[in-house]
Amino acid sequence: MSATNRRRNRGIALLVVLWACTLLAILLGGFATLARTESIQTRYLSNRVQLRYLAEAGAMRALAECVSRSGGRWVGDGRRYRLRLQDHDIDIRIQDELGKVDINAADPRVLQRLFVAAGADDATATQLAANIQETRDTNAKLFHEEGAKRYAEAGLAGGPRYREFDMPEQLQTVLGMTPALYRKLAPAITVWSRRPEPTLALAPPLVLASQPDMDMPKAERYAALRAMTSTSTPPPPLPNGQSAGAWRGGLVRTIVASATDGQGTAASVIVTFRLTALKGGLGYSVLRWQEDGAG
């Protein structure tokens, strides 16, 4: 073999070695990136699980307060309570269902005002309130075919329920309800109060904003003032002069507990429960349990 051929072969071998080293470097880099990504995901999931259990601990703390012999010191008007556990912050709110608008019992005018406060225009709010009235009216079942046709034309299957709502989430099945509007309404609606009007002393800001001569800024300022008011004194009147009623709550309440790690990661639980009478005290039964939901 000539010297020229030997040099050519050595050059080819060198190129092959260089390409092999490059390929190995790429593979090793990919494996390292994959391992780092899996490690980050594992830490994130582990952190989320820890936060969820901390949020559950916050909910249990609120439940214990609600069933205490003294009736508890925590108020069901949505004011915030904070705990610190294992170097994490837990934010807790208790919302009495009497402060919300009952989509089974509320007058259509109450519903219409709530929808307007949530951002719907008057025409949309009026029609949506009428659709809810139709949906929960068992006598309207006689017009099932007409209702099913209107729903089908809007791309919705099944038509109106023609019976009461079992859960607040079922409001999303009503003709005219949008996901964006429902997200705003979710903390302000219920099926458990059985009242035609909400108790304003316990109402969340959106319900307060739906009252005459009220808006969201006024409602939020009032909620902040109410949160600083002791229940040993009557709740302050609304900015429009309307009485807020009494602090007395009902048997069904919702707890929203959120835990954060200070780096943007959070987990929350939403627990709706009913107080029950037990010999020598109070107990509770859970009606709804949600994780990372809206409340």
Image (tube, rainbow, N blue to C red):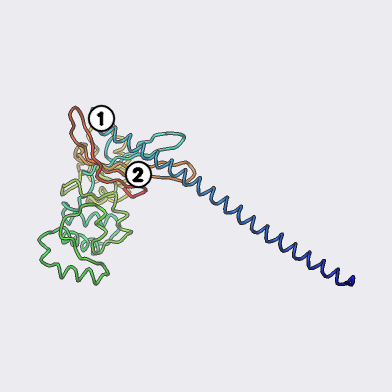
**Image position, residue 277 (x, y; %):** 18, 34
Other residues around mark 2 within 10 Å, as few (<14) / some (14–19) / many (≥20): many
Q: Which mark is residue 24?
A: none
Quarter that holds the N terminus:
bottom right
Quadrant of the rendered image containing residue 92: top left
From the image, tell me which residue sits under label 1: 68
Kindly indicate whether the residue at mark 2 contacts the one at mark 1 (C-beta within 8 angstroms).
Answer: no
28 sits left or right of 169 in the view:
right
Q: Please, is residue 209 above or below residue 53 in the view?
A: below
Q: Nearer the viewer, residue 9 or 171?
A: 9
State which tag comes first along the sequence, 1 or 2. 1
Q: Nearer the viewer, residue 5 or 257?
A: 5
Quadrant of the rendered image containing residue 135: bottom left
Q: Residue at x 19, y 45 (%)?
A: 193
Q: Residue at x 15, y 49 (%)?
A: 196
Amino acid type, callout 2? Val
Q: Nearer the viewer, residue 202 or 257?
A: 257
**Image position, residue 206 (x, y; %):** 28, 50
Q: Nearer the viewer, residue 74 or 67?
A: 67
**Image position, residue 178 (x, y; %):** 30, 61
Q: Residue at x 28, y 31 (%)?
A: 73
Element under label 1? loop
Amino acid type, callout 1? Ser
Q: Which mark is residue 269?
A: 2
Other residues around mark 1 within 10 Å, as few (<14) / some (14–19) / many (≥20): few
